[in-house]
Image: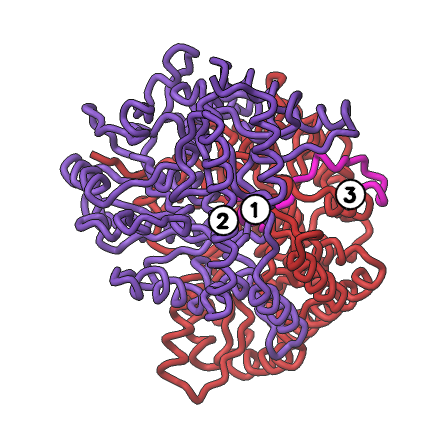
Chain colours: A purple, B red
Amino acid sequence: MLKINENFVKLPASYLFVDIAKKVQLFSQQHPEKEVLRLGIGDVTRPLPKSVIQAMKDAAEEMGSSATFRGYGPEAGYLFLRDAICKNDYQGKGIEIDPDEIFVSDGAKSDTGNIGDIFDRENTVAVCDPVYPVYVDTNVMAGRAGDYSAYAGWSKIIYMPCKKENGFLPELPEENADMIYLCFPNNPTGMGIHKDELKKWVDYALERHSVILYDAAYEAFITDPEMPHSIYEIEGAKKCAIEFRSFSKTAGFTGVRCAFTVIPKELTFNGISLNRLWGRRQSTKMNGVSYIVQRGAEAVYSEKGKREVRENIAYYQNNAKIILNGLAHAGFEVYGGVNSPYIWLKTPERLSSWEFFDLLLEKANVVGTPGSGFGQAGEGYFRLTSFNTTENTKEAVERIIKSFSAA
Amino acid sequence: MLKINENFVKLPASYLFVDIAKKVQLFSQQHPEKEVLRLGIGDVTRPLPKSVIQAMKDAAEEMGSSATFRGYGPEAGYLFLRDAICKNDYQGKGIEIDPDEIFVSDGAKSDTGNIGDIFDRENTVAVCDPVYPVYVDTNVMAGRAGDYSAYAGWSKIIYMPCKKENGFLPELPEENADMIYLCFPNNPTGMGIHKDELKKWVDYALERHSVILYDAAYEAFITDPEMPHSIYEIEGAKKCAIEFRSFSKTAGFTGVRCAFTVIPKELTFNGISLNRLWGRRQSTKMNGVSYIVQRGAEAVYSEKGKREVRENIAYYQNNAKIILNGLAHAGFEVYGGVNSPYIWLKTPERLSSWEFFDLLLEKANVVGTPGSGFGQAGEGYFRLTSFNTTENTKEAVERIIKSFSAA
């Protein structure tokens, strides 16, 4: 008799953003005349850089002739892309990372979700609260979360509250956390972290022999020179941290799918290399990323590609400013948005996160993400993203201000 | 203190095809003048169908304008592709499968590797011997395999020997197998299975409440009308089987990456739907397949695409015939190759699989895959593939015949 993985049954039936999509779909069906503005899921709207498109078209063309056709590629990604990543994102910035420490994948969601495969299920997991749901849900699936209670969350997970009182930065846990998920600039709060602050986490991890799972998917939005773009800018990090990067928010790859994970060769536990374990996991459970997509990602590092990407980022950064300043000026309590595409809004009129979601959709026809969907400490907060068009962003801000009193 | 997943340590450090690639690379470095012919890894050589390339170029173009840009797609795949799959691979062949029973992914390797996530680690796994290593290795990683001994293999895995004596078809296990991996046409033996024979497995699974994990990646190579292209051609299969399909070998997508998994809604255990569990797994751990790739896959089902694909398959089928007939005529003992791109060769001169691999590389400069790499029952056998060019295939057959006496 087959036994299913009972941990799945403990999970809410669907994923946060799937729930939101259903609510919005229902509203649109009931009010086809209303134009809904989406500042909810962190999806981009700017078209792909021209250089990326050209590279993908050329790669597709190559696949059409026997002489240049490519079949199975290296599971960890083609060297041309891993080289470009190393040179541009690391070596060029004084960080010594080699191509064989890079693993190209179809998304940071896949990698942050699958990385648990190489760790024992008895490890203690620590996450920020609020947090990107994937870190928690995938550990529930793996049996590391224990049992859920509405009051305390998952019994075996260490939650690190990030609230107004601590500047939305987590505090070092007193318990021994073996697997520590950190995401900076943060999703959902939009807060960045300074080098000296991140150094505390590296020291903690080195002292307790923990691994830091560092999600840097939003590093391109950093404006503050004191904020590290990579955790490897911190001394000792190569001995305790895995870094996740993505082309999704930087180059508009949410629909193209390409990301990469960095596992330094120095990162070992009891003499066992995590780089080797992940390499084994990837070469056994996947066959690499589409050649066409990898050529597109390579083009992100061309001079033209870099210029185009900078323009896209600047566009979204301007949107973030519009939301932040617009709402602040109207008296709303807003955070993030400076080193991040996300604005973290205190819900007005003492509304709960979901109450505000429903009212916002109903009154302003604007979609955001309820803070409580990211964890208990997110209750009473709401995430807005800067990934829509500037026009829609301005319109959405006006509607929010019109529909709610900041007081 | 972080604990790694010790199951990884039990595994051989690298994956079979990685080992082979290294051996071949070394040989080529030492003998740069020798032209090595690869009939080893099951990778295709024919360029992509023109219709697929055009569709991908058009899709890339769409991503370049705000009006047609696509960000995150549905995790299970775009409806246009799931519809095309249903209509062409199932409904058109009298099998009732709905689009919401289809999950598009980046490869059958990913899906057969990840499917274990939704099952308890205490399930008993049954595999054919010889077998595609991914089924075994991923269950080792999950802790379902027990301990390895050179004599008996993995202690908790039920091996179903497929030898000359039983026509290379597995026999129903006496023990209760909860998760049964079947692959037909088979990799590596190249043997197909008839409907009445497969029916026995469906009946076994229904009676024991087991799940059949049916890998149909090679169905396009079936020539025998008595052989099912889908397990759902067998009555009752929707209540016990998950089917894995791929565009890799059919449409030459090994470097493009697209596949799909079918989980009928009727497939439940203790009232829990596997379709729902897999949907939850996929929506939590991945973000769907590249839009560009999905448009390419859709084009496989266009009239032009179908014609082009049939031509490619016919080309490889002809190569298989060349190997099969050529070696048989020279007195070699060969199997498979009729409903499959794989030829299963009894090693000549009583050589072990790896001895023959090394000698074949050295004397004939031909690369194949040692049967023992697929399991103990594969010892003394050797896999050749028909995915190279016809010219190279002919040349390789001549070299094999010249270098070895069949006796």
Residue B383 lies, with reference to residue A224, above or below; the image says below
Reading the image, the residue beneath label 1 is: A44
Q: Nearer the viewer, residue B237 or B114?
A: B114
Indicate the position of residue B242 as horizontal and vertical percent values. Answer: 64, 36
- Front position in the image: B198 or B151: B198
Q: Which contiguous range is marked in magenta?
A: B90-113
Q: Nearer the viewer, residue A280 or B219?
A: A280
Residue at the left extreme?
A207
Task: Identify the residue at image location x=76%, y=25%.
Answer: A31
Instruction: Indicate yes or no whether the magenta region holds residue B109.
Output: yes
| Residue holding disc 3 | B83
Amino acid residing under circle 1:
Val
Secondary structure, mark 2, is helix
Residue B130 visible in the shown view:
no
- Residues at marks 2 and 1 touching, judged by CB atoms closer than 8 Å: yes
- Numbered tag placed on residue B106 in the rendering: none
Q: Residue at x 72, y 31 (%)?
A: B238
Q: Are marks 1 and 3 on the same chain?
A: no
Give how far apart the Cα atoms at labels 2 and 3 are: 30 Å
Q: Residues within 10 Å of mark 3 (few under 14, many from 20)?
A: some
Q: Secondary structure at mark 3?
A: helix
Amino acid type, mark 3: Asp
> Which chain is mark 1 on?
A
Percent across and percent down for residue A399 are: 61, 29
Quickly name the residue at label 2.
Answer: A249
